[in-house]
Image: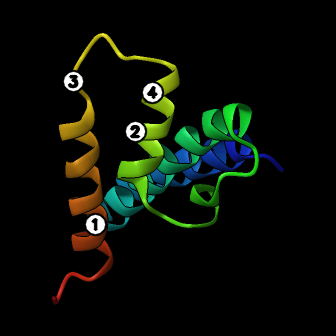
């Protein structure tokens, strides 16, 4: 499986969790899906990047955005994604 296919699996899980009212888990998996989609692009432009080994979504986004400039400011959205990922993963922190 590649990153894109893994993201598609996450999206299926998101729909199931959301429909079951498991919103915290749906948020967590949404963030994972976004990370995987970004990695799907990163592996095309930098297949040996150390960013592919971790979950540093902000710097993964920056690396992808450097190659494929967005017409909108998305870094703020990505930072929120990281925040909600952590909050949904560790809700008691």
Q: Which of 71 and 14 is in front in this view?
A: 71
Label 3 vs label 1, nearer the camera: 3
Identify which residue is drawn at 40% across, 39% down. 62
Dot 4, crowdedness within 10 Å: few (<14), some or many (≥20)? few
Q: Measuring from the top left, give residue 92's x and y in whole percent.
A: 16, 89
Q: Marks 1 and 4: which is nearer the front?
A: 4
Q: Earlier in the sequence, mark 2 or mark 1?
A: 1
The answer to whether the residue labelled 3 contacts the one labelled 1, judged by CB atoms less than 8 Å apart, is no
Cα separation between marks 2 and 1: 26 Å
Residue behind mark 2: 62
Displayed quadrant of residue 26 = bottom left
Which of the numbered marks, if any, corresponds to residue 24?
1
How packed is label 1: few (under 14 Cα within 10 Å), some, or many (20 or more)?
some
**12 left or right, relative to 35:** right
Query: Does dot 3 land on a helix, a strand or a loop?
Result: loop
Between marks 2 and 1 in the image, the one whose residue lies nearer the viewer: 2
Would you call the spot at circle 3 few (<14 residues within 10 Å), some (14-19), or many (20 or more)?
few
The extreme right residue here reads 1
- Describe the element under mark 1 as helix, strand or loop: helix
Residue at point 29%, 44% (across, down)? 78
Q: Name the residue under label 3.
A: 73
> Is the C-beta separation of discs 2 and 4 under 8 Å?
yes
Q: How far apart are marks 2 and 4 (CA)?
A: 6 Å
Q: In this view, does 65 lie above or below 68?
A: below
Give left or right: position of 4 versus 26.
right
Say whether residue 49 is left or right of residue 51.
right
Contact flag, marks 4 and 3 (Cβ < 8 Å): no
| Residue 55 visible in the displayed image | yes
Mark number for residue 66?
4
């Amino acid at each position: 499986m590649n990153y894109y296919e893994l993201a598609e699996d996450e999206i299926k899980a998101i729909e199931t969790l959301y429909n079951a009212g498991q919103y915290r888990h749906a948020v967590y998996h949404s963030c994972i899906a976004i990370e995987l989609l970004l990695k799907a692009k990163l592996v095309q432009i930098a297949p040996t990047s150390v960013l592919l080994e971790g979950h540093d979504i902000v710097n993964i986004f920056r690396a992808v955005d450097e190659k494929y400039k967005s017409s909108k400011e998305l870094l703020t959205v990505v930072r929120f994604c990281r925040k909600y990922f952590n909050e949904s993963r560790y809700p008691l922190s």
